[in-house]
Image (cartoon, rainbow, N blue to C red):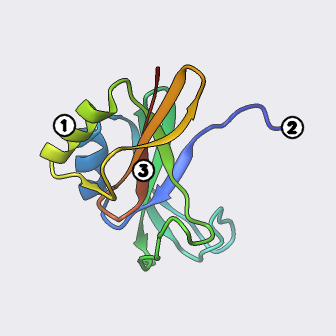
Amino acid sequence: MIRAVHHFSFTVKDLEQSLDFYVGVLGMQIISDTTVQESTDHSVTQIDNAKLRIVHLEAFGQVIELIEYLSPVGKSLDTRTCDVGSAHIAFRVDDLSQTYEELLSRNVRFKSQPVVTGASPGKIIKSVYFLDPDGITLELVEIGT
């Protein structure tokens, strides 16, 4: 049976550009960086002769896997948050306004300014969506009082 989440994964267009963002801007650390050539007789992806560069990142206690298909080269998808299959990862922060301003100063693209997205007795939840270089949606969340 399933015991735990191992990692989250995104396919990206340009790993170097993605690493500049995830490592250089967001502060994640590279755990591994490998290139894999899959054959036609055994393939996890079920894509014949796929060649992939796979980087695993330590992401605040979790692992994020970034994959660039060196061949065949894939196409970009519409990743609007309302589209079926669209996914995102939410990162918890202590001070959303400060984190927002810091990332904004580093040219990170946001979908809006931070907003209150929930409240319950004694707790206020604020969040904001932002985009990685491929337009993949990520989220910042502050749970405060």
Q: Which residue is mark 2?
A: 1
Disc 2 secondary structure class: loop
Answer with mark 3 or mark 2, whichever residue precedes in sequence: 2
Answer with mark 1 or mark 3, whichever residue precedes in sequence: 1
Q: Are marks 1 and 2 in contact (CB under 8 Å)?
A: no
Q: Which residue is mark 1?
A: 102
Disc 1 secondary structure class: helix
Instruction: Name the amino acid, label 3.
Output: Leu
Answer with mark 1 or mark 2, whichever residue precedes in sequence: 2
Residue 135 falls left or right of residue 98: right
Residue 27 visible in this rendered orientation of the protein: no
Disc 3 secondary structure class: strand
Q: Are marks 3 and 2 in contact (CB under 8 Å)?
A: no
Q: Residue furthest front?
A: 121
- Disc 1 from disc 3: Cα separation: 16 Å
The image position of residue 34, as x and y in percent, is 42, 49
Residue at screen point 19% across, 39% down: 101
Q: Nearer the viewer, mark 1 or mark 2?
A: 1
Q: Is residue 102 above or below residue 131?
A: above
Residue at screen point 60% across, 75% down: 47
Residue 29 falls left or right of residue 85: left
The image position of residue 56, as x and y in percent, is 44, 42
Q: Which residue is mark 3?
A: 138
Q: Name the image quarter holding residue 43.
A: bottom right
Query: Dot 2, how many residues are within 10 Å of its Cα: few (below 14), some (14-19), or many (20+)?
Result: few
Q: Residue furthest right?
A: 1
- Disc 1 from disc 2: Cα separation: 42 Å
The image position of residue 22, as x and y in percent, is 31, 44
Is 81 or 52 nearer to us in this picture?
81
